[in-house]
Image (cartoon, rainbow, N blue to C red):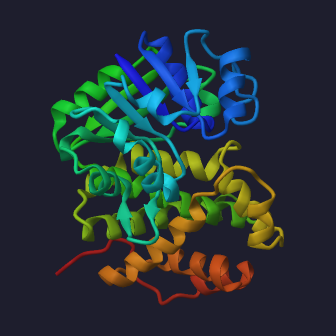
Amino acid sequence: MRIGVVGAGGWGTALAKLLTENGHEVSLWAYEKDTADEVNQTHCNHHFLPGIILPEKLTASSDPEQVAKESEVLVFVTPSQWVRSTVKLFKDFIKPGVMIINAAKGIETSTLQCLSAVIREELDWDDGKIITLSGPSHAEEVGRRVPTATVVASPALQYAEIAQDIFIAPYFRVYTNSDRIGVEIGGALKNIFALAAGICEGLGFGDNTKAALVTRALSEMRRLGEKMGAQPLTFSGLSGLGDLYVTSASRHSRNAWAGREIGKGRKVEEVLKSTPMVVEGVPTTKAAYLLGEKYQVELPITNIMYKILYEGYPPVQALQELMSRERRHEIETIF
């Protein structure tokens, strides 16, 4: 198939490489012309995916029309807060009926919408043809063909199955799910908790602390997701528990890295300015905090993270506040 991949960061580049190796005709859109030129001339993207050699057949461009005009599938892989503006940039060049796959993870802070809803609103598209790709999948490892499992989600499973066929490879296993909202919530909220796990490491705490954090984080993810219409079992899957684990534990996680730096005492603004990469957990914390208020859901870790990131709350004090909360049963039962 002719596929356009929109976004030449690490993840977009890794997916473009995978799709090209799967035999598709792939065009990669880069915001920076220098990045597009590097991909075309040297078959590398040193800035965003260092050390990975890209297929010679993979082409890149900074022209939206050139990437979109012949594409049968468009894969959006931009930072979450830029999804809407990027879709607007492309919308006049997208052919009717094209399948849209979103591989970004986050929630739009200005509207509190999941990214599939943002895309549908801008394109007025067949809802089933907007598919979400998520799961525990670091670009650095996919680029090196490390065995990986992901999930593609759409309320119309026949389109998710087409996306499954497009992406699946000997080292890249793809499952389908009809619970797109659950897959999106899991993929977005895990970045908040990876930041929190990083803060725990930066403060010098150990595995016990991180294990407790991740376990309770999964409960928060499920509580908010259910209120928004998600299926509880989705959060036990790849886009929930799987992505939460890898993003909290991996050396590749930019969110965990940012958390460690904050835990060591660096200011949030300083940490964000020190990297060209987007730390998605920061805007997602704000969005989830506001969603918790909107749906009246108890989100203690999210609320504490909001205080740390947006109100300058000391991380040590935040942990003490979490540990001294009113005692309760582990299993939440509704009578």
Q: Does the image show residue 112?
A: yes
Seen in the picture, residue 172 relative to 177 is either above or below; the reply is: above
Q: Is 144 or 101 nearer to us in this picture?
A: 101
The image quarter in which residue 186 lies: bottom left
In-image side of 26 versus 297 (left or right):
right
Seen in the picture, residue 194 relative to 66 is either above or below; the reply is: below
Q: Position of residue 106 (x, y in %)?
A: 47, 57
Q: Is 238 or 112 nearer to us in this picture?
A: 112
Q: Is 49 or 86 nearer to us in this picture?
A: 86
- Residue pictured at 22% horizontal, 51% vertical: 124
Q: Position of residue 265 (x, y in %)?
A: 83, 73
Q: Does the image show residue 203?
A: no
Seen in the picture, residue 141 relative to 138 is either above or below; the reply is: above
The image quarter in which residue 71 lies: top left
- Residue pictured at 40% horizontal, 46% vertical: 239
In-image side of 191 versus 69 (left or right):
right
Quadrant holding the C terminus: bottom left
Q: Is 61 or 135 nearer to us in this picture?
A: 61
- How many numbered marks does the figure carry? 0
- Residue pictured at 50% horizontal, 20% vertical: 18
Q: Position of residue 222 (x, y in %)?
A: 34, 64
In-image side of 305 versus 287 (left or right):
right
The image quarter in which residue 274 lies: bottom right
Q: Position of residue 20 (x, y in %)?
A: 49, 15
Seen in the picture, residue 236 relative to 73 is either above or below; the reply is: below
- Residue pictured at 48% horizontal, 35% vertical: 64
Quadrant holding the N terminus: top left
